[in-house]
Each structure stands twice: as C-alpha cells, then as structure tokens.
C-alpha cells in the first residue's frame, strides 16, 4: 500500500521557490531518509507532506487520501511528527506525554501504559515527574521523539531525531526505531544531516538540494546505478601513481578516479572478476608496485556526497552558460 | 469538536499559567488596585464632605448625574458614596477581564511561538476550531473568574465601609448583577478573541500586548464618559452593550476561526 505520494509539488515562501517539483512515493513499512544540506527544503517538505502548508502546485496524498484543508485533521490522527520544536518546559515529562495522549484520543490507562514503556525505553523513567525544562537538551529531544511515537502512528516523521543525543543514545534510538518498524509496519520519513547509522534503519533515500529531489529510491538501487560492477579500492606505491593511472586508463572495462587527497589511491570500477584479473596482470607487467586491492563498499554517505557534488557541478555549469 | 482534546489544551495552558509569575502578577495587581485600594480610598475620603469637595471632578460627576437615579431622600454624603460605588466604578470592572485576558491571551499563540512549541501543537489532530476555542477559553475563564472574585471583594468592601452610612447592605444593584453575569463574560470573550487574532500575526508577546492596549481604549473612553456624565452606566446601557458585544463576539469568533491559518502561523514564526 502506498502511504505517501507526492506529485509535482511546488512551494514558494517569501518570494523564493523552496520546493521545486517534488515527486515521491513511499510504501507501507518503508523507512525513508530525506537528506540534504541546510536550506535544501527538508522541513518545508515535511510541512507540505503533513498538510501544514498547502502546495502552490501539485498534489500530496497520504494513505491514498488527498491532503486538503478538509482532510488534514483526520489524517493527522494517523501520523506522528517530531520536529525541531520545544516540548513544554513548564510541564513535567509525564504531563508533556499525557497531553499528547489526550490530543490523540488515548484513554488514560492506555496512555499511562504506553508512557511507562516509552520512558523505560528512553531511560527517562526516573525523571517522569521532573519539569521538562530541568532536563538536558538530549533528554528533551527524547521526550519530543517519545511524543511522536506515543499513539503508535502509521506514519512517522522525524526531523533530526538524534540531534543533541550522545552517540550511545543515538544508536539506541535508531535501534528502537528499527524495532518499531519491524513490529508495527510503521512508515518512517527521517530528515537528517547525520548520516552515521542510517543505513541500518532506512532502505530508501531522497536527497534534496536547492528544493529539488535530485535522487530518490532504494539505497541499494541508487548505489548500484551510480557505481555499477565491482567497486574496488586500489593502492599503489606513491612513485608509481602515474604509471598506474596509465594502466587503469588503458584497461578495457575499467573506470577509475584518482584520490585527490591521497597520491597512490584510486577508486576503481570493473565490469567483472575477469577484468580485475586482467587489471592486476597489467599493473604488475608495467612494474607498478601494488600495495592493495580491496572491494569498496559504497553506502548512503558516499551516495549523498556524490549526488550533491554532481548537483553542484551541474549548477555551476548552468550558471557559466 | 472533541471535548478531550479541547479540555487537554485548556488544562495545559492553565498549568503553564500557574507556573508563570510574570502572567500571574497583573492578574492580582490590577483587581487589587481597582477593587480594593481605589474603593477604600474614595469611600474613606468621600465620607468626609470637606475632603470630598476638594476631589477634582467629583462635584462635576455628581452634578452631571440625571435626576432620580440616586436613592430618594438620601443625604449629600449618601448620594456621593452611592454614585461612586454604583456608577463611577462600574466601567473599571470591564477593564479587569480585558486586561487579564490580554495578558493570558497574548501568551496563547504568540507565547507558544516565542517558546517554539507551536509547531508541535499544529501537527496534532486538534482542529482549527478546537485550537482557537481552547485558547480563548483558557484565557477567558481565568479572566472572568478574577473579575467575579474582584466583584465579591468589592461588594464586601463597599458594604463594610459604606454600609453603616445606609444602615445595611446596599450593594450590588440589579444593574451590577447584569453587568457581572452577562456583560463581563461577553466583554472578556471579545477581548480574548481579538487578542488571539492578533497573536496569530504578532511575532512577540510584547507586540501582541501592544496591540491589546487598543482594545482597552474604548473602555477607558467609557470611564471618561461616565465621569463626565455623558454616558451613565445604568441598566439600559448595560443591556444594550451586552447585546452589541454578544453580536460582536459571534462575528469576531467566526472570523477568527475562518481566517485562522496554520500556514500563516508557521511562516510568521
């Protein structure tokens, strides 16, 4: 079942086009990482997808239902959102969560049971009666995430959920989200700059740059598309760098890129194992001292930087023209 | 309209209000001045004809009162106390709900904006109507409660200080009961609705409260009209005002709900 669908969504704010033709489709139980640098349009995208902002053009649907001013009240019941906003600092941790339980129509018994489980999970049980304002930033962040999870939403939006959390707490949160998705089939849209640990959680990724979704799809598919064949990391003696570059260029079925930072290091793509064998033989024959040839694993982080680099290069070319 | 959500929002605002000394202070100080300090001073001084004659404007106020509104056969001293207690102070009791509501109401949307809590609220299933009504009631109920409490205190004080002069209880009059039970809540609702409307657009609580000052001006004009005898706060005036304010309440509430926009609130953060 398609949970989130956006087609040709555009939005201007303050005379600037913040979102420029967003197309997106996300199925139930998928975890989607919405990545992008500051000002790329991530927060506006979340606001558009949740109906808080109305698009200037295009259409958004959630759970197969068009998002309109008339439908959003009911749709919001099925979603949970954590954004870069504060919790109520003059209320206790428990009161902050109970308030959300009431907003989502939970009975006091159900809300208390769920609050107890969430506070246990986030290590906040001992602070349930403390005022939120007395807690650290990381703890307040956990309350904000717990608030979004409280009513077990079918669709969950998290905006920088690990901001302010220490590495251990970040990993714990990612683990908890993984468990939640596995157990309940919740669909997740996660906006972040922090790429570490995301691959364990998100199968799908969208990369926003300047309001454009410049890449979107399953991480594995996008990586395979960008770096087809076997990806290798070749290291040769520094003095043999130029000779190696010549061999790499001359070997059929091989594409390569020298590392700008480390002389003697190359990112190599080869079509198959036979090509790799030919490459090693050619390097040896040319007297290149090979220090290592290892399989290179590309992931979300590599994809993110490669896509952004490519986008910036395209933009620069367009400006030059 | 979902009662659970509405009540949760109101309760939340009250819990926050109870921990906000900056908002609580005007709720105590304003009624204290209007209902305790000023009446005691005026009534104490007013019972002394020599001192009363020295109070500027008081003679003009008494002379401007229409015939037949003061108790028949009352002495000059009784007339003065009665006129001050029953007519002179009446408009001040319309200022109390407005001023208290402006303090609480200003912190409704705009306070949530300043504390960066509003966006979380906008993502919940609260409807626009629930959000607006919840914010209005959260400010209105305390402002009316404070006004009524001030009224009870005022009644005790004026009867205690002025009672011996009249030989017993002489306050409240039916006009005052009409004003407190009908006009004060309606006036409070009007003030809060307008402040909530302003709060949607204002970026800071100071600017919202600055706009709220303009709401108080018509009441100040009423105080002045009253003291010059141009408008007397009798039953017909209170009844007419109640009717007009009730119509204004309905129109403004519908307009506030209609023009309430989550997008406008978010993009003006």
Image: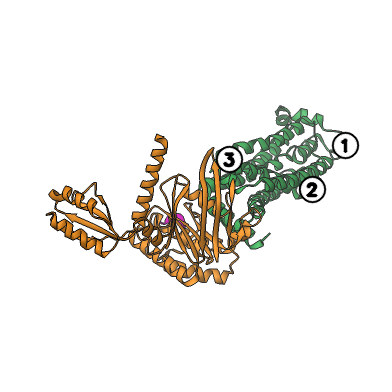
> Which label's residue is closer to the chain start, 1 or 2?
1
x, y (%) of residue B216? Answer: 67, 37
Circle 2 crowding by C-alpha within 10 Å: few under 14, some 14–19, many from 20: some
Q: Which chain does the residue under circle 3 lie in?
A: B
x, y (%) of residue A161? Answer: 43, 57
Q: Residue shown at 82%/33% (left/top)? A: B65
| Chain A colour as displayed | orange
Contact check, label 3 and label 2, Cβ < 8 Å? no
Q: Secondary structure at mark 3?
A: loop
Residue on which the image places disc 2: B178
Tell me which chain appears green: B
* B227 shown above or below B187: above
- Residue B206 or residue A182, whichever sits in front: A182
Within the image, what quadrant is residue A291 found in? bottom left
Q: Which chain does the residue under circle 1 lie in?
A: B
Which residues are the magenta region?
A131-135
User: Could you tell me if residue B45 is visible in this image?
Assistant: yes
* B236 shown above or below A182: above
Q: Residue shown at 25%/64% (left/top)? A: A274
> Which label's residue is closer to the chain start, 3 or 1?
1
User: Could you tell me if residue B97 is visible in this image?
Assistant: no
Separation of marks 3 and 1 at Cα, in angstroms: 48 Å
Residue on which the image places disc 1: B68
- Residue B76 or residue A219, whichever sits in front: A219
- Residue A249 or residue A225, whichever sits in front: A249
Residue B232 falls within the magenta-colored stretch:
no
- Residue A199 or residue B220, whichever sits in front: A199
x, y (%) of residue A214? Answer: 44, 50
Circle 3 crowding by C-alpha within 10 Å: few under 14, some 14–19, many from 20: many
Residue on which the image places disc 3: B202
In this picture, residue A84 sits left or right of residue A63: left
Q: Are marks 3 and 1 on the same chain?
A: yes
């Amino acid at each position: 079942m398609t949970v989130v669908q956006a087609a040709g969504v555009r939005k201007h704010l303050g005379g600037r086009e913040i979102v420029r033709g967003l197309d997106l489709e996300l199925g139930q139980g998928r975890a989607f990482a919405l990545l992008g640098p500051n000002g790329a349009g991530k927060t506006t995208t979340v606001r558009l997808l949740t109906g808080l902002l109305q698009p200037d053009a295009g259409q958004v649907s959630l759970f197969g239902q068009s998002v309109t001013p008339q439908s959003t009240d009911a749709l919001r019941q099925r979603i949970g959102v954590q954004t870069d906003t504060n919790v109520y600092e003059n209320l206790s941790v428990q009161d902050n969560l109970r308030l959300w339980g009431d907003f989502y129509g939970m009975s006091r018994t159900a809300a208390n049971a769920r609050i107890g489980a969430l506070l246990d999970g986030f290590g906040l049980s001992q602070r349930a009666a403390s005022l939120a304002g007395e807690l650290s930033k990381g703890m307040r962040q956990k309350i904000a995430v717990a608030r979004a999870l409280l009513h077990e939403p079918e669709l969950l939006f998290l905006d920088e959920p690990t901001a302010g959390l220490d590495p251990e707490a970040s990993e714990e949160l990612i683990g908890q989200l993984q468990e939640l998705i596995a157990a309940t089939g919740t669909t997740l849209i996660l906006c972040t700059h922090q790429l570490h640990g995301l691959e364990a959680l998100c199968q799908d990724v969208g990369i926003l740059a300047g309001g454009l979704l410049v890449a979107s799809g399953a991480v594995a598919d996008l990586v395979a598309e960008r770096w087809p064949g076997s990806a290798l990391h070749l290291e040769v003696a520094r003095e043999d760098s130029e000779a190696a570059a010549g061999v790499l260029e001359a070997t059929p079925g091989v594409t390569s890129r020298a590392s700008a930072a480390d002389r003697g290091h190359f990112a190599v793509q080869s079509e198959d194992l036979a090509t790799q064998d030919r490459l090693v033989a050619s390097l040896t024959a040319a007297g290149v001292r090979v220090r290592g040839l290892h399989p290179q694993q590309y992931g979300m982080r590599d994809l993110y930087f490669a896509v952004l680099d490519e986008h910036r290069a395209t933009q620069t070319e367009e400006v030059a023209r | 309209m979902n009662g659970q959500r509405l009540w949760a929002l109101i309760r939340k605002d009250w819990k926050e209000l109870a921990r906000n000394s900056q908002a609580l202070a005007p709720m105590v100080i304003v009624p204290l001045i209007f209902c305790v300090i000023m009446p005691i001073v005026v009534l104490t001084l007013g019972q002394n004809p020599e001192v009363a004659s020295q109070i500027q404007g008081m003679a003009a106020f008494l002379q401007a009162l229409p015939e037949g509104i003061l108790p028949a056969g009352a002495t000059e001293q009784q007339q003065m106390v009665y006129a001050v207690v029953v007519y002179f102070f009446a408009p001040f009791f319309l200022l109390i709900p407005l001023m208290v509501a402006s303090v609480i109401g200003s912190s409704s949307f705009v306070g949530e904006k300043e504390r960066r809590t509003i966006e979380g609220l906008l993502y919940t299933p609260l409807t626009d109507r629930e959000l607006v009504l919840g914010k209005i009631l959260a400010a209105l109920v305390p402002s009316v409660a404070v006004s009524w409490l001030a009224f009870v205190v005022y009644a005790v004080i004026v009867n205690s200080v002025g009672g011996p002069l009249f030989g017993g209880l002489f306050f409240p009059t039916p006009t005052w009961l009409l004003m407190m039970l009908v006009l004060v809540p309606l006036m409070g609702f009007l003030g809060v609705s307008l402040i909530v409307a302003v709060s949607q657009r204002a970026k800071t609580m100071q600017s919202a409260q600055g706009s709220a000052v303009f709401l108080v001006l018509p009441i100040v004009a009423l105080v002045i009209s009253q003291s010059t005898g141009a408008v007397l706060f009798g039953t017909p005036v209170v009844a007419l005002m109640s009717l007009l304010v009730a119509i204004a309440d309905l129109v403004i509430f519908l307009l506030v709900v209609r023009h309430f926009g989550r997008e406008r609130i978010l993009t003006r953060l």
